[in-house]
Amino acid sequence: MLKKLLVLLFATVVGLSFISTAAFAGVAKGQKLFIKKMKKPCGFDGGAMAKKHTQSEWKAFQDAGKLNDELIRICPKAKPLKDKYVPHVYEFLFNYASDSGNVPSC
């Protein structure tokens, strides 16, 4: 019985570590995508972009399907992101929003 409990506990810990790693991967990929696709045409880094809104504001743009529109409004020289990139950039912007307390390294 104790062995089964320990196996279950270990499996839970391992499973949770994959979930947190996947969430971090979205943020890191979003940061890389911002640097590659938007930093030069915007003239500022991803941290400056993320600080333009709070987490709830970034979430509202994402939920409404208007995140790309807002990015282009802030940075008109940039090209719109491909749809497959938007969720990753959103994770980055949300994670480093003005009210998040986090500071990106880009």
Image (cartoon, grey):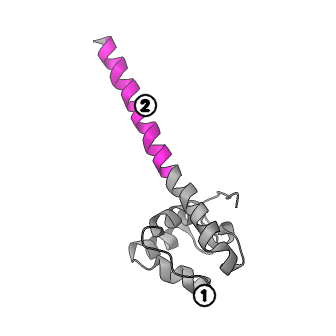
Mark 1: amino acid: Pro
- What's the CA distance linking mark 1 and mark 2? 45 Å
Magenta range? 2-23
For the point 32% across and 12% down, which residue is it?
A: 2
Under circle 2, the secondary element is: helix
Front residue (pair 6, 25): 25
Q: Which residue is mark 2?
A: 13
Q: Is residue 66 above or below residue 98?
A: below
Question: What x and y, as percent, mark residue 99?
Answer: 61, 64
Question: What x and y, as percent, mark residue 17?
Answer: 46, 37
For the point 64% across and 58% down, which residue is it?
A: 101
Residue 62 among those drawn in magenta: no
Q: Which residue is mark 1?
A: 76
Mark closer to the chain start, 1 or 2: 2
Under circle 1, the secondary element is: loop
Question: Which quarter of the picture shows residue 31?
Answer: bottom right
Residue 10 among those drawn in magenta: yes
Mark 1 packing: few (<14 Cα in 10 Å), some, or many (20+)? few
Prevailing secondary structure class for the magenta stretch in the rendered image: helix
For the point 48% across and 51% down, which residue is it?
A: 23
Question: What x and y, as percent, mark residue 35?
Answer: 64, 67
Mark 2 packing: few (<14 Cα in 10 Å), some, or many (20+)? few
Q: Is residue 17 above or below residue 41?
A: above
Question: Which quarter of the picture shows residue 13?
Answer: top left
Query: In the shown orientation, is residue 33 left or right of residue 2?
Result: right
Front residue (pair 85, 1): 85
For the point 55% across and 84% down, which residue is it?
A: 72
